[in-house]
Image (tube, rainbow, N blue to C red):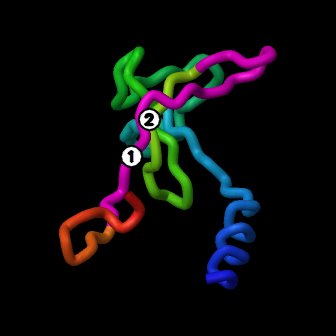
Amino acid sequence: MAQENVMHNLLQDMNILLNISLGEAQLSLKEICEMKPGFAFKLNKFAGEPLDIYANDTSIAKCEPVVIDETFGVRIVELNRRTEPETENGENCHE
């Protein structure tokens, strides 16, 4: 048990790179080659729709953009809960 606690503490100190996805678009090669400053195109998300937060290409949460001290930031609006393994009596292991 003590070794598990040490490993748990080490893992908690790790930095994980998060990516915030504003949306996706599919463009033709011709459109990409013709890009220049001022070129605009639609994404697959609507204005006001929550953005996705990814850790290691896994969606972990939804967020909304905010401004924090003159820089962009995000506010979490929903966490994605992964399925926890169940015990024999049907309860989640971490409850």
Callout 2: 10 Å neighbours few (<14), some, many (20+)?
Answer: many
Q: Left or right: 17 with respect to 22?
A: right
| Image coordinates for residue 11, horizontal then vertical, percent | 68, 68
Query: Which residue is label 2 attached to?
Result: 62
Which residue is depicted at the point 39% across and 37% down? 25
> Which of the pair 86/13 is nearer the observer?
86
Is residue 30 in sight in this rendering? Answer: no
Q: Mark 1, mark 2: which one is toward the viewer?
A: 1
| Image coordinates for residue 77, horizontal then vertical, percent | 45, 28
Residue 80, numbered label: 1
Is residue 94 in sight in this rendering? Answer: yes
Above or below, 58 relative to 10: above
Callout 1: 10 Å neighbours few (<14), some, many (20+)?
Answer: few
> Which of the pair 58/44 is nearer the observer?
58
Q: Is residue 78 magenta?
A: yes
Instruction: Report which quarter residue 79 is drawn in.
Output: top left
Q: CA distance from mark 1 to mark 2?
A: 8 Å
Which residue is depicted at the point 39% across and 46% down? 80
Looking at the rendered structure, the kind of residue marked 1 is Asn
Q: Earlier in the sequence, mark 1 or mark 2?
A: 2
The residue segment tinted magenta is 66-84
